[in-house]
Amino acid sequence: MIPSITFQPFLPISWLLFLGGLTTLFIIIGLITQRDRALLRSMASASLILVLLNPTLIKEQREPVKSTVGIVIDHSESQTFGTRAQDTDTARAQLINELSHYTQFELRFIEVGKSSDNHYASSTNLFNALAHAISDIPPSRYAGTILITDGQIHDIPSLPELNHNAPINALITGKKNEFDRQIKFVSPPRFALVNKPQTLSILVEDKGKIRESVPAQANITVSVNGQDVGHYSVTPGVIFQTEITLSHAEKNVIQVTTDTYEGELSLDNNHAITIIEGIKENLRVLLISGAPYNGERTWRDLLKSDSNIDLVHFTILRPAEKADDTPSSQLSLVVFPTTKLFVEDINNFDLIILDGYQHSTTFPLIYYDYIAQYVKQGGALLMVTGPEFTEESSLAKTPLISVLPALPSGAIIQKPFRPTLTKEGERHPVTRDLATPAYPASQWGRWLRQIAIQNTGKSIAVMKGADEEPLLLLSRVGEGRVGMLLSDESWLWARGFEGGGPYAALYRRISHWLMKEPELEEEKLSAISDHNRLTIRRQTLQNHPGPTEVIFPSGKKENITLTKEKEGIFTGAINTDEIGLFTIRNGDQTVLSPVGISNNLEFSDLISTEEKLAPISKHTGGHIIRLHNEKKNDIHLPPIKLIQSQTGQVSPFSHSIVLKEATETRSVNISHFSLFSGFFALLTCLLLLGGTWYRENY
């Protein structure tokens, strides 16, 4: 209760000043002229002025303002090991009970580590969450912070960045004698060339109190896409380097594992996984054109525009035996290097394209056999056929026949037709998404000529043309692939005839499928993970891919049914709490997929620690206390001590939770009592006025 006196005048101050001045003037005149009568006049005048000033006694009742205690609960993934989660819950309950005795505090809990969809964060960022949670609290009303954590925090601010002066206390979960061995990649590459050696740097680390049973050397195993490629003995703490070779493009799963030992804090970090994208060096394409025609440059221009392709293009304008009297010095043409291309360098090409080409004496027949062998051993061949395919010099009458997907019937269909997709073409990745808003299938331009064939053998017809005849054939021969486009009119799409069509996408996909682009495989199983969710995607030409088996890192197996997303695509997903390498199988397809973030900071160091928080806690006058006493398994909170110190001052207490009391107060009740008003003031004024009158008259 704090009393005070103030004035609450009935008239404006200016009026009171005028009246007061006038009264004072009369009093002075009275004192000069009639001193014996002036005293009562002065008192009567002063009482009237005092009534108008209305002096008031104010009594204000105040109480201390409640201050806020920020309690940050660490629910990060590293808090799930050992008894840390249980320790956290116990400490929280005890803390609430202890602080309930301090009515001057309000508690604000900040839960950090899990999002609303139950996903773990990849790092522990307690201070960012704390700063956001207490941003509305004035510094003078903030009592301090209590962190319940294992000490592995990744966003501890530097001392100059600290924006409040309240004590920061930490209750450390976990035990002091923890031990853990981990293995990790050191700066792993994101990309590597296929079939080229790639160096990997691997580090094994022993942290905490090392057990006597743990040997000085660590055994590690390196695997690529599930196949072991090396076993090594390494020294913990020393970076070990080894080389691997990627056998295919796209995603490659690289895993390293090390031995596990009893008493380790976690076995989840005894293996590490990284993804390396395999990329091919520039693809080499050999394009051989026959007689000139309107579409001759279409393939050349498209292939030249692809920076990943090195194109070698030859156009055979005349056979070598044909006489030409032009002097050699004036010729700009070169002799076709058949021996170099088809004997010495044929295996250096990723794709051979024969565009409107027919047999000539330039090519010995044995060279066609070389091309056929090249295909069977893993090469790729694309034939773009026109009328020459039906003639006597057709390539169907050479040793190349052993790899051709179809033979000509001899007929040439000469009429307009609109290319369409077959049932298989609607599912095949080469043609599945050709129709786009820019080029809807119903508006594709027509072609004017097509070559009829006798049969398609084991090939797949993905496009059809005139009279429902096959237009585009794709086939596998041995280890290689062959494509056959049964029309030389596709250039009409490039020229925009009747609106054109998606020629660029078609050409690019045909050539890249032939060169075994992984994304264009018609039978492909893939999987990707997002936190604890594994999504499976199956690409197939079948009506349904059948059940899919998922093998967890723990060895547990689970079958899931994939649902149709669109033609040729089936997907499914599962949620899991396991971290590691999952194996997914569907039919003859198998794929590996890691679940868990490969660069997860939560697994970089699992040993509970007091060291990281020590500088900031000391600076703010707080304390760091381990919940587990070395001699006891149960936990007990330290006492709570209250201070009013500022940043930089050392707390006078030890082994305690230090909080700062607020010095601010707030008014809860105000009472007003007028000191000179009412009957008392009236009586006083009447007595003084009466006394003045009496003195004046008697």
Image: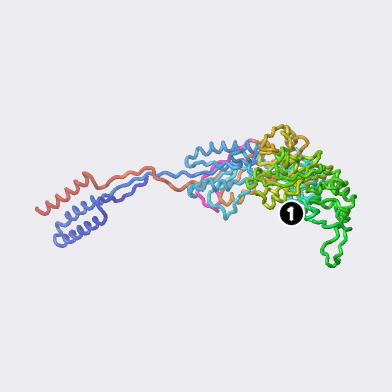
* Percent position of residue 627, x then y: 62, 40
> Does the segment drawn in magenta span residue 654?
yes
Residue 544 in the image: above or below residue 180? above
- Residue 107 shown in magenta: no
Instruction: Give the image location of residue 390, x and y in percent.
Output: 82, 46
* Dominant secondary structure (helix, strand or loop) of the stretch shown in magenta: loop
Residue nearer the viewer, 4 or 549 = 549
> In percent of the image, x 21 and y 44: which residue is there?
679
Residue 312's spot in the image, x, y percent?
80, 56
Q: Amino acid at mark 1?
A: Asn
Magenta stretch in the rendered image: 634-655
Using residue 174 as the reference point, say whether residue 362 is left or right of it. right
Most foreground residue, 456 or 208: 456
Q: Residue furthest left?
A: 698
Rendered-image quadrant of the N terminus: top left
Q: Nearer the viewer, residue 244 or 214?
A: 244
Residue at 71 percent of width and 37 percent of height? 423
Label 1: element kind: loop
Q: Which residue is mark 1?
A: 294
Residue drawn at x 61%, y 51% is: 615
